[in-house]
Amino acid sequence: MKGATGKAAAVKSGLRIVAGEWRGRKLAAPEGATTRPTADRTRETLFSMLISRLGTFEGLKVADLFAGSGALGLEALSRGAAHCLFVDQDPAAVRALRGNIANLHAQSRSDVRASSVLSLGPAKETLDLVLLDPPYDTGAGAVAIDKLARLGWIGEQTWISLETAKTEAVSIKGFVLESARDVGKARLHFLRREV
């Protein structure tokens, strides 16, 4: 691992794809303390809960917002998702993310946006699954979900997973909290649009 001014991302032990086509492949995490990668245990629980709701990831259109290393979106692609939009504004995270996508030869199924989630414009089509892992205790996830719904990214059939600190409560107008589960220091929230 290089110093704080280096361009390389560090491969941190334990950060790897859990299942699917790329099972066991290591992922590089961004340098520095800005990004907090989702722990493998939390990711395993998250995807187990998602598979019980979705049935399969085959052909899904997914977004990994506040993407960091891209571990969530790459896990979905590994399990058969057709395409993933990755969004993160941290330069170190974007470098690590692009490197992970290249190492897995997933460029044709990936769209990386080096920007704020809130800078996304209107959607061309709704997504099947939105994965959000924003900084804890900021409320950024709720703000992003509200805006993306207004821009057409989130439809009535879209599943949303929002990871927060265990102490954070989530309430977003127009959305129903389908379930929540604590895993370690994290709380996983599953939301759907109110119909």
Image: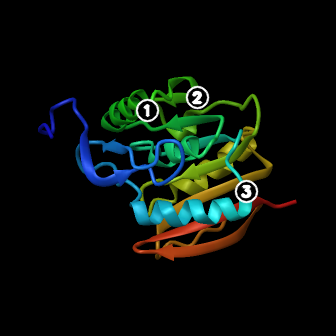
For label 1, the crowd category at 10 Å Cα-Cα, with few meaning under 14, some 14 to 19 and many 20 or more, is some
Could you give the CA–CA distance between mark 3 and mark 2, rounded to whole angstroms?
20 Å
Could you tell whether 81 is left or right of 106 in the image?
Answer: right
Q: Residue 83: which numbered mark, if any?
A: none
Residue 9 rendering spot, x and y as whole percentages? 25, 37
Can you say whether 70 is above or below 132 in the image? Answer: above
C-beta proximity under 8 Å, tags 3 and 1: no
104 or 159: nearer the viewer: 104
Question: Counting residues from the N terminus, which is met first, the one under dot 3 or under dot 1?
Answer: 3
- The residue singled out by tag 1 in the image is 104
Q: Amino acid at mark 3?
A: Leu
Residue lying at 46% horizontally and 54% vertically, measured from the top left: 18
Residue lying at 55% horizontally and 63% vertically, measured from the top left: 46
Residue lying at 54% horizontally and 43% vertically, measured from the top left: 78
- The residue singled out by tag 2 in the image is 109
Question: Counting residues from the N terminus, which is met first, the one under dot 3 or under dot 2?
Answer: 3
* Residue placed furthest toward the left: 3
